[in-house]
Image: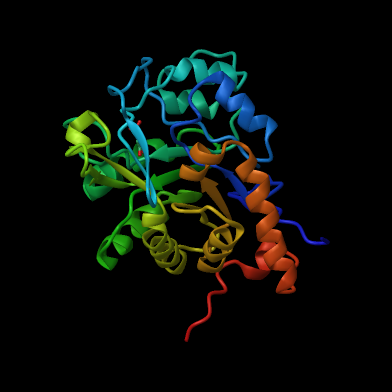
Amino acid sequence: MHNNSHTEIAGVQLNSYVFNAAGARDVTYEELTAIGKSESSAITMKSCTIEPRKGNEEPRYKDIPYGSINSMGLPNLGYKEYIKISLCREDYITMLRAFQVSEVDLIEVNLSCPNLKGKPQVAYDFEQCEEIIGEISDIGKKPIGVKLPPYYDFVHHQMMSEIIRKYRIKFVTLINSIGNALFIDAEQEAPVIKPREGFGGLGGHYIKPVALANVRKFYKLLPENVSIVGCGGIYTGKDAFEFLLAGTSAVQLGTIFMQEGINCFGRIDMELRQIMERKGYTSIADVRGKLKSL
Ligand code: DHB
C-alpha cells in the first residue's frame, strides 16, 4: 500500500488515524505501557482525580450483544501518578495546571462522565460547562480538548459549539458512552453490572449512529481549526472510514480495545488504508468530512 493514515489533532502529528479511547483499559502503568508498545498512534489515559480511587463495586464492566455497558466509577491512580508517568518534575496545584507542564501533548478534559453518584454530567449543564471551560482554557499552552456526551437536539449542538469557539478549545472528542443505559439479563432477572442498580454507560455497536450524528453536526458547526476525534462503535476499518467521511481527524477505540486487546489498533488502521487504497485516496485529508448528500 502506498497510502498512509498520518493525521494531526490540534497541530500534534500522529502516525495513524487510530488510537485508544479513555476507558477501562488505560488506568495502570502496565496498561498504558502496553498501548505505547502497540500500533495505537497515541496513548489516552483514563480520567483521573486528585486522590487515587478504587471505583465502583464489581461487576462494573460487561460485554453485551452489540457492545458494552460500564459503571467503573473512575478507578484511577490519582493524578500525581500520571504526571510521573509523563515525566514531569515540578509540583502542581490543580490537575490541569499539572498536566500543562507535563510531557503530555494533548489534554482531553472529560465533561461527560455518566457514572458518578449524585453528580450530573457537566456537559448537559451549559452554564456550568461554560464556567469550567472558561477557567481551564487559558492555563498554559498545551492544546485542550473536551470529551462530550451525545447530544440529541440541534439546539444543544449549537449552544456547545458556541462555547467551544468562544474559549478556543482545540479539539473535541465525540462521543462518550450513552449514559445511564440499563441491560437486563432475562434468565438472571437482574442487571449485568452491580453499581447504581445496573445503570451504566453504553458503548459499542449500539452507539455508532449517534456518534456519527454528533461528529457530523459538530463538523458543520465548528471552525476548521477545531479537530474532531471520533469515538463510539468503531470495530473495523469501515467504521473508521465512516467517521472520516463525517469529519474526524482521528478515532479512538474503547469497547473493541476491551474485547480484542492491543491488536485492534494496527488491524483497524490497515483495514482503513485498504479501503482508502481501493477508492484511490492517498491521505486522510482527501476524505475528511467529504460525506456526500443524496
Ligand atoms: C467513567 C465512565 C465514563 O464514561 C467516563 O467518561 C469517565 C469515567 C467511569 O465510570 O469510570
Query: Is residue 135 in view from this perspective?
Result: yes
Count the labels in the image: 0
In the image, is residue 183 above or below residue 288? above
- Residue at 65 percent across and 42 percent down: it is 41
Placement of 169 over or under 92, stated as above or below:
below
> Which residue is depicted at the point 22% across and 47% down?
125
Which quarter of the picture shows residue 185?
top left
Towards the viewer: 104 or 231:
231
* Residue depicted at x 71% and y 60%: 273
In the depicted view, which residue is nearer to us: 31 or 105?
Answer: 31
- In the rendered image, the residue lying farthest to the front is 187
Whether residue 281 is visible to the viewer of this picture, yes or no, is no
Image quarter hosting the N terminus: bottom right
Specify whether 73 is left or right of 14.
left
Percent across and percent down for residue 42 are: 62, 39
Horizontal side of residue 170 vs 267, given as left or right: left
Q: Is residue 105 above or below residue 4?
A: above
Q: Quadrant of residue 201?
A: top left
Residue 213: image location, x then y, percent: 39, 65
Answer left or right for 64 relative to 8.
left
| Residue 139 spot, x, y in % from top left | 46, 33
Where is ligand 1, by quadrant? top left
> Which residue is farthest bottom?
294
Residue at figure coordinates x 57%, y 74% from the top left: 290
Q: Nearer the viewer, residue 72 or 217?
A: 72
Res 162 → quadrant:
bottom left
